């Protein structure tokens, strides 16, 4: 067995936390966890939790995987391999479904620890309840449907209020939603929705940070496929994408050229409509 095969075997036997800590503390480019936390805009205790394998310290599964992916890319590791190993450690398959009981003990001393069980475990309990009590649930549904049918049947017809049409009234069509490439999952920056010229949508999991002209962070979050962010109007905002190939930029309802490809981190991206529609300069 050669040296490369030995290294691969050792890596395969290591936990995700051991791989991350080893990548950060060995080699020529040793780095402090505080420095990386500031650079990625991820709390230091969350990165420490990843290295310790203490996943209950991070409140949601999407954040566990998102933080791990960005941390791995920053350390020069394969983010897909790290995410796959975390899912294996937590007993999840590639679709995020449980293959073993998903209840995870909670550390009550952790500031952001969940108060009961993880969201995956909660879904598992709901499914178990439904299987055990399906007859009662079916009976209740039938009663509700019957009550609705009875109410509709006995409501007098023809008593709807008729509102006279006003003369010379101009009907204005409601604004239509942009047809994004991925179905919308969640909206952020909705206070900017009416004025935003630029909308960002994640087609792949990616960390996104938006700063104003003074370098103040106005938005920082891991977006998952379908999430959109309405960028404030104006020409003073710049962005950093943890996975530049996973973000679509829409300008006035039109898809702008990609500012980069692949799982590459890119900073200083101008979010002005003209710069985005002009495409990357590099």
Image: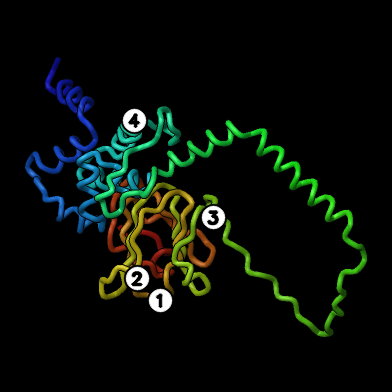
- Name the residue: 42% across, 28% down: 99
8 vs 201: above or below: above
Q: Quadrant of the C terminus?
A: bottom left
Using the numbered discs, state the Cα–Cα distance from disc 4 to disc 1 in whole angstroms.
45 Å
The residue sitting at the top extreme is 1
Circles 2 and 4: CB atoms closer than 8 Å: no
Say whether disc 3 or disc 1 marks the residue closer to the N-terminus. Answer: 3
Q: Position of residue 242 (x, y in %)?
A: 31, 52
Q: Is residue 159 left or right of residue 194?
A: right
Q: Is residue 14 left or right of residue 253?
A: left
Task: Name the colour scheme.
Answer: rainbow
Number of numbered discs: 4
Q: Position of residue 74 (x, y in %)?
A: 22, 47
Using the numbered discs, state the Cα–Cα distance from disc 3 to disc 2 in whole angstroms.
22 Å
Which circle marks residue 259 in the picture? none
Circle 3 sits on which residue?
Answer: 180
Using the numbered discs, state the Cα–Cα distance from disc 3 to disc 1 in whole angstroms.
22 Å
Relative depth, front residue between 264 and 58 = 58
Q: Is residue 261 left or right of residue 189?
A: left
Circle 1 sits on which residue?
Answer: 234
- Name the residue: 24% across, 39% down: 53
- Name the residue: 83% across, 50% down: 149
Using the numbered discs, state the Cα–Cα distance from disc 4 to disc 3 in whole angstroms.
32 Å
Residue 79 location, quadrant? top left
Relative depth, front residue between 223 and 114 = 114
- Name the residue: 33% across, 56% down: 241
Say whether disc 4 or disc 1 marks the residue closer to the N-terminus. Answer: 4
Circle 2 sits on which residue?
Answer: 237
Using the numbered discs, state the Cα–Cα distance from disc 1 to disc 2 in whole angstroms.
7 Å
Q: Position of residue 94 (x, y in %)?
A: 42, 32
Which circle marks residue 88 in the picture? 4
């Amino acid at each position: 067995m050669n040296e490369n095969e030995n290294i691969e075997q050792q890596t395969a036997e290591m936990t995700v936390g051991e791989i991350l800590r080893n990548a950060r503390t060995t080699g020529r480019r040793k780095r402090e966890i505080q420095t990386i936390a500031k650079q990625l805009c991820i709390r230091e205790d969350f990165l420490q939790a990843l290295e310790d394998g203490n996943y209950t310290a991070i409140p949601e599964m999407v954040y566990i995987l998102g933080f791990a992916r960005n941390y791995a890319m920053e350390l020069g590791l394969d983010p897909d391999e790290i995410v796959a190993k975390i899912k294996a450690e937590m007993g999840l398959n590639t679709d995020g479904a449980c293959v073993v009981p998903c209840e995870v003990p909670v550390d009550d001393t952790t500031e952001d620890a969940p108060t009961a069980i993880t969201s995956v475990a909660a879904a598992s309990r709901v499914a178990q309840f439904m299987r055990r009590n399906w007859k009662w649930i079916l009976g209740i549904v039938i009663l509700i449907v019957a009550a609705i049918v009875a109410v509709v049947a006995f409501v007098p017809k023809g008593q709807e209020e008729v509102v006279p049409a006003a003369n010379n009234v101009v009907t204005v069509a409601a604004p239509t939603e942009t047809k994004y490439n991925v179905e919308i999952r969640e909206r952020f920056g909705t206070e900017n929705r009416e004025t935003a010229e630029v909308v960002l949508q994640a087609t792949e999991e990616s960390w996104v940070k938006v700063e104003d002209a003074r370098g103040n962070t106005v938005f920082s979050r891991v977006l998952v496929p379908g999430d959109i962010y309405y960028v404030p109007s104006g020409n003073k905002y710049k962005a950093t994408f943890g996975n530049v190939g996973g973000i679509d930029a829409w300008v006035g309802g039109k898809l702008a050229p990609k500012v980069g490809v692949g799982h590459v981190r890119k900073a200083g991206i101008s979010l002005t409509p003209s710069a985005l529609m002009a495409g990357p300069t590099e």
